[in-house]
């Protein structure tokens, strides 16, 4: 039983060895290069550290959702090829061109903006063309892709070195719509090929397709959840080839025996049925520990239920016995033979694993470990 008083009352532990192993696993499986998707601060794991680990393990590209995330990576000296998957504002385009950040080209408006700014800056804008094969989000429809690409060529000053699309149903392992999207994508890629547009980077596979859809591999896959060890499927149980990188820990603040009938916390939602040991942990909904039924923690290898309402900064738990100040407690992860998986927490919180780890606030420091 670990019992050291830590510098921080609560922290996230991110295992970068797991990120490296997961990255290598994806590439060994697909035999094509990998674009590591590290949007939303790598789902709360820390974009810079996860990016470095993924690149170290052999990832070729990085992707983020917004330009502000790309800027942060460039400022850290990360100069790997980098795609912004989402919107870029006109204000940010010049900086993107200067810093070799690749932009998602998904509309005539973006094409005009890129050509215009590239001409002004005196350097071509790097872009990957986004095709909407059935996500209904960003992208040009497959049937209009040739006309669009010709317009882009005619406009000039855009270096188109990728074509991509995104799945809407890939998180259901056998869903037939994923095959439909692959076919539409192939058709669009072929149509462009026939008019002489053959960019080197062709990618559609997210984590779930990276793991299970060989036909979706093309020249690169694009995975976020998988490199973090998050299982992307809603309808199949996790495989143990991927290792979760994320644990959430804290230290015990107090443990004391309270008498039968004593009531716990705001709203007095728990009354002791007998004398019990109640622990207090310095974690609350102000950290993203959500009020929900069935919350648990691990202490000394035992599962201990949360009792009473979660407070902003503190939470009460029912302990099997008294433990000293500083005893290590796990909210997500494992300790001894007990484990609380992110997916268990996701079910309790009515979200998915990504929702859990991106929802732990930045107030909780991230610590990085290797094993
Ligand atoms: C989030 C995202 C990904 C990565 O999805 P995972 O399921 O985390 O692998 C890939 N492509 C796009 C466009 C995305 O928005």
Image: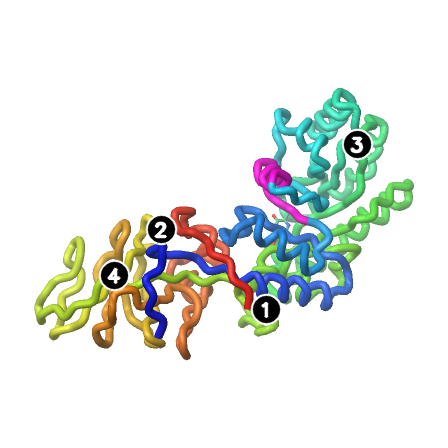
Which residue bears the numbered disc 4?
Answer: 253
Residue beneath the point at 61% across and 60% down: 227
Q: Earlier in the sequence, mark 1 or mark 4?
A: 1
* x and y percentages locating residue 57 in the rendered image: 68, 60
Mark 3 vs 2, N-terminal side: 3
- Residue depth check, mark 4 versus mark 2: number of the one nearer the observer: 4
Q: Mark 3 near ligand 1 (CB under 8 Å)? A: no
Q: CA distance from mark 3 to mark 2?
A: 44 Å
| Residue 281 sits in quarter | bottom left
Q: Main secondary structure of the magenta part?
A: helix
Q: Nearer the viewer, mark 1 or mark 4?
A: 4
Taking the image as drawn, is residue 156 in sight? yes
Is ligand 1 closer than 8 angstroms to the Cβ of mark 1? no
Does residue 232 appear in the picture of this structure?
no
How far apart are the two marked residues, 4 and 2, measured between alpha carbons? 16 Å
Q: Are marks 3 and 2 in contact (CB under 8 Å)?
A: no
Question: Where residue 37 sits: x, y (%)?
Answer: 62, 51
> Secondary structure under badge 1?
loop
Residue on which the image places disc 2:
287
Drawn side of residue 189 relative to residue 80, left or right = right
- How far separated are the C-alphas under marks 3 and 4? 58 Å
Judging depth in this view, the residue of 210 and 289 nearest the camera is 289
The residue lying toward the viewer, choosing from 140 and 333, is 333
SS at mark 2 in the image: helix
Q: Which residues are magenta?
A: 62-75
Residue designated by label 3: 158
Q: Which residue is mark 1?
A: 242
Mark 1 burial class by Cα count in 10 Å: few <14, some 14-19, many 20+ = many
């Amino acid at each position: 039983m670990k019992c050291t008083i830590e510098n921080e009352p609560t922290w996230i532990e991110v295992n970068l060895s797991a990120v490296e192993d997961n990255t290598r696993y994806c590439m060994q499986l697909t035999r094509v290069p990998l674009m590591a998707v590290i949007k939303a601060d790598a789902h709360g794991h820390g974009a810079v550290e996860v990016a470095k680990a993924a690149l170290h393990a052999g990832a070729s590209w990085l992707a983020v959702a917004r330009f502000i995330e790309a800027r942060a990576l460039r400022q850290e000296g990360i100069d790997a090829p980098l795609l912004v998957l989402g919107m870029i504002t006109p204000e940010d385009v010049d900086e993107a061109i200067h810093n070799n950040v690749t932009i998602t080209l998904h509309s005539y408006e973006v094409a005009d903006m890129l050509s215009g700014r590239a001409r002004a800056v005196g350097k071509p804008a790097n872009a990957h063309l986004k095709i909407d094969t059935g996500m209904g989000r960003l992208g040009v429809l497959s049937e209009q892709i040739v006309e669009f690409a010709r317009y882009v060529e005619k406009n000039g000053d855009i270096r188109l070195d990728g074509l991509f699309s995104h799945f809407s149903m890939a998180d259901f392992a056998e869903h037939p719509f994923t095959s439909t999207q692959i076919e539409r994508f192939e058709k669009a890629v072929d149509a462009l090929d026939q008019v002489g547009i053959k960019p080197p980077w062709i990618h559609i596979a997210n984590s779930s397709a990276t793991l299970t859809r060989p036909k979706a591999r093309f020249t690169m896959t694009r995975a976020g959840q998988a490199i973090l060890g998050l299982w992307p499927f809603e309808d199949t149980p996790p495989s143990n080839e991927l290792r979760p990188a994320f644990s959430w820990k804290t230290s015990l603040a107090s443990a004391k025996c309270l008498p039968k009938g004593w009531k716990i916390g705001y709203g007095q939602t728990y009354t002791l049925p007998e004398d019990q040991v109640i622990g207090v942990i310095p974690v609350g909904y102000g950290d993203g520990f959500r009020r929900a039924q069935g919350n648990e923690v691990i202490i000394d290898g035992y599962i201990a239920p949360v009792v009473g309402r979660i407070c902003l900064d503190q939470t009460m738990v029912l302990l099997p016995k008294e433990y000293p100040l500083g005893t290590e407690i796990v909210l997500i992860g494992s300790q001894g033979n007990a484990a609380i998986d992110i997916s268990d927490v996701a079910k309790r919180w009515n979200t998915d694993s990504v929702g859990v780890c991106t929802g732990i606030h930045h107030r909780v420091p991230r610590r990085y470990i290797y094993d």
